[in-house]
Image (cartoon, rainbow, N blue to C red):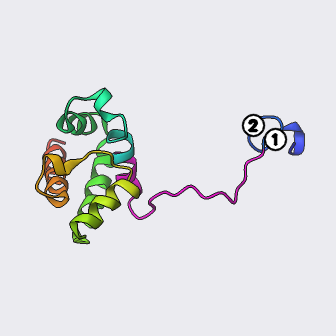
Amino acid sequence: MEKGGACQSGVPGVRINKSVHFPMNIEFSELHDFFGAYFHQDWLVEHETAEQVLDSFLTESHVDVLMVVQKELNALLNQEKDELVLRKYLLKELSCYYSYWNAWESGEAWLRHIASRLTKRLGQF
């Protein structure tokens, strides 16, 4: 128990181990949030297509979020990652569970499509 009867975790007898590290992509935190929230493991339960997922993101998100995602997406594209490196990066670092290679010629092509949709949506504000 911490001072005043409260414990660190809010649950009696349970303490938070602050030394435990949960990996998160710091370089592209908003992009990580986008992929993790919209292209998560169960995205097909909520949407039939990846385009529907993207439509939801574009209509539900605040303009400031869209701008940061676009900026981070462009920065990621500027890194010119090899296809297999990009595929692994999207899954492991950005929590993207969409298998784009079944519908797109490359990860770069798919990401450029997202960037284009972002540009079009931001032009509506």
Q: Is residue 123 left or right of residue 61?
A: left
Q: Is residue 55 above or below residue 15?
A: above
Q: Which residue is mark 2?
A: 10
Residue 76 placed where, x, y %?
28, 65
Residue 1 placed where, x, y %?
87, 42
Residue 76 in view (yes/no): no
Point 25% across, 55% down: residue: 70
Q: Which residue is mark 1?
A: 7
- Image quadrant where one finds the C terminus: top left
* Magenta extent: 15-34
Residue 102 in view (yes/no): yes
Q: Is residue 73 above or below residue 122?
A: below
Query: Of the residues shown, which amino acid type is indicated by label 2?
Result: Gly
Q: Nearer the viewer, residue 31 or 106?
A: 106
Residue 105 placed where, x, y %?
10, 56
Q: Are marks 1 and 2 in contact (CB under 8 Å)?
A: yes
Q: Is residue 56 left or right of residue 30?
A: left
Q: Nearer the viewer, residue 115 or 49?
A: 49
The image quarter in which residue 45 lies: top left
Query: Of the residues shown, which amino acid type is indicated by label 1?
Result: Cys
Number of numbered discs present? 2
Q: Is residue 8 magenta?
A: no
Q: Is residue 111 left or right of residue 90?
A: left
Q: Is residue 104 above or below residue 14?
A: below
Circle 1: element type: loop
Cα–Cα gap, marks 1 and 2: 5 Å
